[in-house]
């Protein structure tokens, strides 16, 4: 396609398409010729075409300013390759999904999966990869920090080596670099990488990479074992695969973010730790139950502090102090579980209030079960008072977790 004024007609139409019904998006340059769109658009009679060889999955959240530029870069980097890009957008407020769909209206290589009511990078990547028939699947970020020119050598290696399962874009092999990271970010990345080796036994230089390419058959062999937690889908793949994976690492330099904001925050850290917990002990005990129990243990501390303040240091009776401490601990546990244990099913607004009522009712029954089991064991042997207490706690913990998982934080809680 001939260039005109530095941009092909197709790209001028892309930039026009970027505006169609897209509120709040910045205006692109519009030095356009007067040639009609029909000069390059397909004929009215559709033709059956083979699917793409390579699908690039790009999870997005408020990355609208980068979408058109990323497509332009992919077009330049993958000349001669039958490729597509699949933007998987978690209902961005900045109109990312609308922009991607507008571009897809003039280029069949661009698709968008617009997810409503679902969040999470790992889940977005999985959903995007499952939507593609391509034999090779790549994952990269939508913030332009991953080097798209590394995709072609990755693809060529996978084509040429049938026993190779995946190619990893690596910042930590010869020729790779983290770019302009400051010392704090480098230190945090080193710690996260060290922790990754607890669940990933293969000698990967950059297990925290979010930039890789995998054979579709290998992904499908592993997908049902994935935790789909957090943002490190590559680490999840290695930790979940039923067999060791054959891989190689392609060096690249991590770029500075051009537009948008970093998604790395306390929530990302928590989800990473959750993934480590799930892959290390999740086969024995559900990771969510472990976090739920840790929250409960913290609630015991809250209970004792409030009880001490009201009864020992204040003038309240023991019964009144115990009631206030119990309600306070239940509320604290509910708030913290809603924030951490069930962050993917978080209740908000009025649903937070109704959820608290259900949680308190379930925990009240759990407390009754605790007392009943503990009393039964204690009456049979008074010397085993500590065991009686622990047995009661265990029964109430399992009860509270089971009931609140089903009734308080079910899938309808977010709707």
Image (cartoon, rainbow, N blue to C red):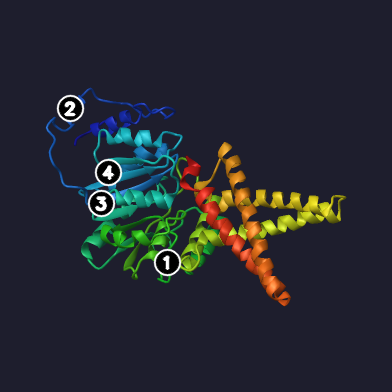
Q: Nearer the viewer, residue 295 or 20?
A: 295
Q: Residue lying at the far top in this picture: please name it.
A: 34
Which one is in front, 64 or 309?
Answer: 309
Percent position of residue 317, x then y: 84, 52
Disc 3 target residue: 54
Q: Residues within 10 Å of mark 2 (few under 14, many from 20)?
A: few
As measured in the structure, the alpha-carbon distance from the residue carrying label 4 to the one carrying label 2 is 21 Å
First in sequence, mark 1 or 3: give its number.
Answer: 3
Look at mark 2 in the image and give the residue it sits on: 38
Q: Earlier in the sequence, mark 4 or mark 2?
A: 2
User: What secondary structure is marked by label 2?
Assistant: helix
**From the viewer's perspective, is 307 left or right of 185?**
right
Give SS at disc 4. helix
Whichever of labels 1 and 2 marks the residue nearer the N terminus, that label is 2
Residue beneath the point at 75% across and 50% down: 323
**Position in image of residue 153 (x %, y %):** 28, 58
Instruction: Report the residue marked by disc 4.
Output: 75
Q: Considering depth in this image, is 374 or 318 the residue closer to the camera?
A: 374
Looking at the image, do the residues carrying marks 1 and 2 touch, with CB atoms under 8 Å apart? no
Disc number for residue 205: 1
The residue carrying pointer 4 sits among few (fewer than 14), some (14 to 19) or many (20 or more) residues within 10 Å by Cα, namely some
Determine the secondary structure under disc 1. Answer: loop
Mark whose residue sits in front, 1 or 3:
3
Towards the viewer: 276 or 196: 276
Work out whether mark 2 precedes mark 3 in sequence or the reverse, and give the earlier one: 2
Residues at marks 4 and 1, CA–CA distance in whole angstroms:
29 Å
Residue in the picture at 18% in, 32% down: 40
Q: Quadrant of the N terminus?
A: top left
Mark 3 residue element: strand
The crowd level at tag 1 (other Cα within 10 Å; few <14, some 14-19, many 20+) is some
Nearer-N-terminus badge (4/1): 4
- Check if mark 2's residue and mark 3's residue have beta carbons within 8 Å: no
């Amino acid at each position: 396609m001939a260039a005109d004024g530095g941009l092909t007609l197709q790209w001028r139409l892309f930039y026009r398409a970027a505006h169609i019904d897209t509120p709040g998006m910045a205006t692109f340059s519009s030095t356009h010729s007067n040639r009609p769109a029909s000069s390059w658009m397909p004929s009215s009679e559709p033709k059956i075409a083979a699917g793409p060889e390579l699908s690039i999955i790009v999870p997005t959240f408020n990355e609208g300013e980068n979408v058109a530029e990323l497509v332009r870069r992919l077009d330049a980097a993958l000349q001669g390759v039958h490729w597509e890009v699949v933007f998987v957008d978690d209902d961005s407020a900045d109109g990312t999904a609308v922009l991607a769909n507008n571009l897809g209206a003039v280029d069949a290589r661009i698709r968008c999966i617009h997810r409503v009511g679902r969040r999470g990078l790992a889940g977005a990547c999985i959903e995007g990869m499952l939507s593609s028939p391509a034999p090779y699947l790549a994952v990269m970020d939508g913030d332009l920090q991953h080097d798209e020119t590394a995709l072609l050598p990755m693809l060529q290696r996978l084509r040429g080596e049938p026993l190779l399962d995946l190619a990893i874009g690596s910042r930590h092999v010869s020729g790779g670099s983290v770019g302009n990271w400051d010392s704090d970010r480098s230190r945090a990345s080193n710690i996260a990488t060290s922790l990754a080796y607890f669940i990933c036994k293969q000698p990967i230089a950059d297990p925290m990479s979010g930039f890789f390419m995998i054979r579709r058959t290998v992904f499908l062999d592993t997908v049902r074992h994935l935790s789909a937690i957090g943002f490190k889908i590559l680490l999840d793949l290695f930790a979940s695969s039923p067999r060791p994976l054959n891989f190689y690492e392609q060096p690249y330099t991590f770029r500075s973010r051009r537009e948008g904001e970093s998604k790395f925050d306390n929530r990302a850290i928590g989800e990473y730790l959750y993934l480590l917990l799930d892959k290390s002990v999740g086969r024995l005990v559900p990771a969510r139950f472990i976090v739920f129990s840790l929250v409960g243990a913290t609630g015991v501390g809250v209970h004792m502090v409030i009880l001490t303040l009201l009864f020992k240091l204040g003038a309240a009776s023991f019964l009144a102090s115990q009631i206030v401490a119990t309600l306070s601990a239940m509320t604290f546990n509910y708030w913290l579980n809603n924030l951490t244990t069930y962050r993917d099913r978080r209740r908000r607004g009025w649903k937070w209030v109704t959820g608290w009522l259900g949680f308190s009712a379930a925990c009240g029954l759990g407390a009754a079960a605790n007392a009943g089991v503990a009393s039964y064991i204690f009456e049979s042997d008074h010397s085993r008072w500590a065991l009686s207490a622990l047995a009661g706690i265990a029964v109430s913990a399992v009860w509270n977790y089971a009931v609140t998982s089903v009734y308080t934080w079910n899938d309808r809680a977010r709707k």
